[in-house]
Amino acid sequence: MPETTRFRSSQDVVLPDDVTDPLLWRAAYDVAAAHQPDAAGHCTSLLCAGRSAPCEPMDNARRAMRLARGARRAEFRETRDRTARDRRRAA
């Protein structure tokens, strides 16, 4: 039977101390690793078809990594009168 376990680059990375959502942080790390720019400044992922870096998936991965960290979540807890729409805009 073939090996079905796939290797993810996030498996070898030590989580930062302030990560409150390890699953989100590791998934975002894997996306960021797959969308690194080449020497010419274009995304190397086939999904981006050579778009200039940083591409949209890289931007979203960076945002998700920030959201997975405790400091960002604490900021939202402090501002209870904000609407969900305001929180999305701030993120």
Image (cartoon, helix red, strand yellow):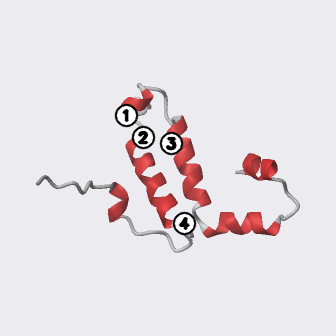
Whether pointer 2 and pointer 1 mark residues with C-beta atoms closer than 8 Å, the reply is yes
Q: Residues within 10 Å of mark 2 (few under 14, many from 20)?
A: many
* Residue name at image x 51 percent, y 40 percent: 57
Q: Where in the figure is residue 51, as x and y percent of width and height?
A: 47, 26
Indicate the quadrant where residue 47 lies.
top left
- Whichever of callouts 2 and 4 sits on the residue coming sooner in the sequence is 4
* SS for callout 1: loop
Q: Where in the figure is residue 10, as x and y percent of width and height?
A: 37, 59
Camera-side mark, 2 or 4:
4
> Residue 38 versus residue 49: which sits nearer the camera?
49
**As shown in the figure, which amino acid type bears the numbered disc 2?**
His
> Residue 37 versus residue 62: which sits nearer the camera?
62
- Real-space CA distance between mark 2 and mark 4, rounded to the nearest whole angstrom: 22 Å
Say the numbered circle drawn on residue 35: 2
- Real-space CA distance between mark 1 and mark 3, rounded to the nearest whole angstrom: 11 Å
- Whichever of callouts 2 and 3 sits on the residue coming sooner in the sequence is 2
- Real-space CA distance between mark 4 and mark 1, rounded to the nearest whole angstrom: 27 Å
Whether pointer 2 and pointer 3 mark residues with C-beta atoms closer than 8 Å, the reply is yes
- Whichever of callouts 2 and 1 sits on the residue coming sooner in the sequence is 2
Mark 3 = which residue? 58
Relative to 66, is 40 above or below?
Answer: above
**As shown in the figure, which amino acid type bears the numbered disc 3?**
Met
Camera-side mark, 4 or 1:
4
- Real-space CA distance between mark 2 and mark 3, rounded to the nearest whole angstrom: 6 Å
Mark 1 = which residue? 44
* Residue name at image x 52 percent, y 48 percent: 61
- Whichever of callouts 4 and 1 sits on the residue coming sooner in the sequence is 4
* SS for callout 3: helix
> Residue 28 versus residue 42: which sits nearer the camera?
28
